[in-house]
Image (cartoon, grey):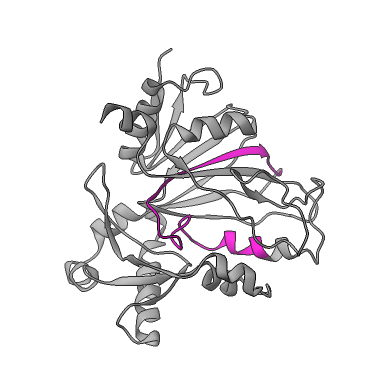
């Protein structure tokens, strides 16, 4: 089987053909995908049509699984998916479209904000894998931003200014920005805020990227107003069209991205009419084959 990697966006998105991860997720295949991610940061593998078990097993080859708390449910309400899977959908536990008053509907509004998966967790989060199980006829795309290119293009004065700064990241900040959810104390206790550097050096490539996200609430050691103004200035710079690529989903797509050097967001669709079932796995730490080689 010959794996081909074709650039979709000159800077940071590629399509990978010639592999069926359902039948071959050997170390050689995973290594080829991770090497492509080092170059492009986002890769699209069409027509994978994975089961939950297959997606979980493939993801485990790239690192240690993180587990979803799938917040937003009412007390006593079951999660729709098993904890290895993050539920990126508009569906309830019976796989019907979420009711207008369902807490999970408002919780997922924050997915439309620019963010980096699990930047609010004190862990070495690396890759996310999003499997398109059911896609709406229009909308519901996923936008990505290349934070390596953003950093490269910053004026040197700004690079110097942020070089040693850190920001506070909290999922509760991003959810508050999206509005409408009354957080419970038991939910808040599960994920306290963490501090992340504003500039990150990629462990595999050595490239620097700027760390932004809707989870970033303030800059350590800086007044709240001044810090948020700086975050807004950097975000405006990062969201110039030349740094952004939009993936239009086809059912069966598997999209993998490197959280260490990208931001992303979901786009709107008619979520009261059409079903959208996307299932995400996310990993941290080195890949299985990298550990074996070491």
Q: Is residue 126 magenta?
A: yes
Q: Residue at x 44, y 28 (%)?
A: 16
**In the displayed structure image, the side of residue 39 where residue 175 appears, left or right:** right
* Point 56% across, 22% down: residue: 22
What is the x, y in percent for residue 105? 72, 61
Q: Any magenta on residue 21?
A: no
Q: Is residue 237 left or right of residue 89?
A: left
Task: Report the span colored magenta.
Answer: 107-136
Q: Is residue 183 above or below residue 31?
A: below
Tell me the residue at 44%/64% (across/down).
213
153 or 3: nearer the eye? 3
Count of labels in the image: 0
Residue 191 rendering spot, x and y as whole percentages: 52, 65
- Identify the image quadrant of the C terminus: top left
Residue 69 position, x and y percent, is 61, 55
Which of the 4 image quadrants contains residue 281? top right
Against 34, residue 152 (above or below) is below
Residue drawn 43% across and 12% down? Answer: 1
The vertical placement of 165 against 18, above or below, is below
| Relative horizontal placement of residue 51, taking residue 103 as reference (left or right) | left
Q: List x then y, in percent, for residue 42.
A: 42, 41
The one nearer the camera, 292 or 177, is 292
């Amino acid at each position: 089987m010959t794996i081909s990697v074709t650039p979709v966006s000159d800077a940071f998105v590629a399509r990978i053909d010639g592999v069926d991860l359902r039948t071959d997720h050997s170390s050689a295949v995973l290594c080829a995908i991770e090497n492509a991610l080092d170059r492009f940061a986002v890769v699209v593998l069409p027509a994978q049509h994975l089961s939950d078990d297959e997606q979980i097993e493939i993801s485990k080859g790239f690192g240690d699984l993180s587990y979803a708390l799938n917040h937003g449910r009412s007390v006593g309400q079951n999660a729709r998916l098993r904890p290895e899977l993050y539920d990126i959908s508009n569906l309830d536990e019976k796989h019907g479209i979420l009711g207008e008053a369902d807490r999970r509907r408002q919780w997922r509004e924050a997915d439309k904000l620019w963010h980096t998966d699990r930047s609010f967790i004190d862990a070495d989060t690396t890759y996310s894998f999003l499997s398109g199980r059911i896609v709406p006829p229009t909308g519901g795309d996923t936008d990505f931003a290349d934070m390596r290119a953003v950093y490269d293009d910053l004026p040197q004065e700004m690079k110097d200014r942020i070089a040693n700064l850190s920001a506070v990241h909290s999922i509760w900040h991003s959810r508050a920005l999206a509005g409408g959810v009354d957080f419970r104390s038991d939910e808040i206790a599960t994920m306290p805020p963490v501090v992340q550097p504003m500039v990150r050096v990629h462990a595999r490539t050595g490239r620097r990227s700027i760390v932004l996200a809707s989870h970033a609430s303030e800059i350590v050691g800086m007044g709240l107003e001044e810090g948020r103004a700086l975050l807004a200035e950097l975000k405006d710079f990062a969201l110039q069209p030349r740094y952004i690529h939009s993936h239009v989903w086809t059912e069966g797509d598997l999209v993998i991205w490197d959280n260490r050097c990208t931001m992303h967001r979901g786009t709107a669709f008619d979520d009261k009419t059409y079903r959208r079932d996307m299932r995400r796995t996310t990993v941290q730490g080195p890949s299985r084959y990298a550990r074996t080689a070491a």
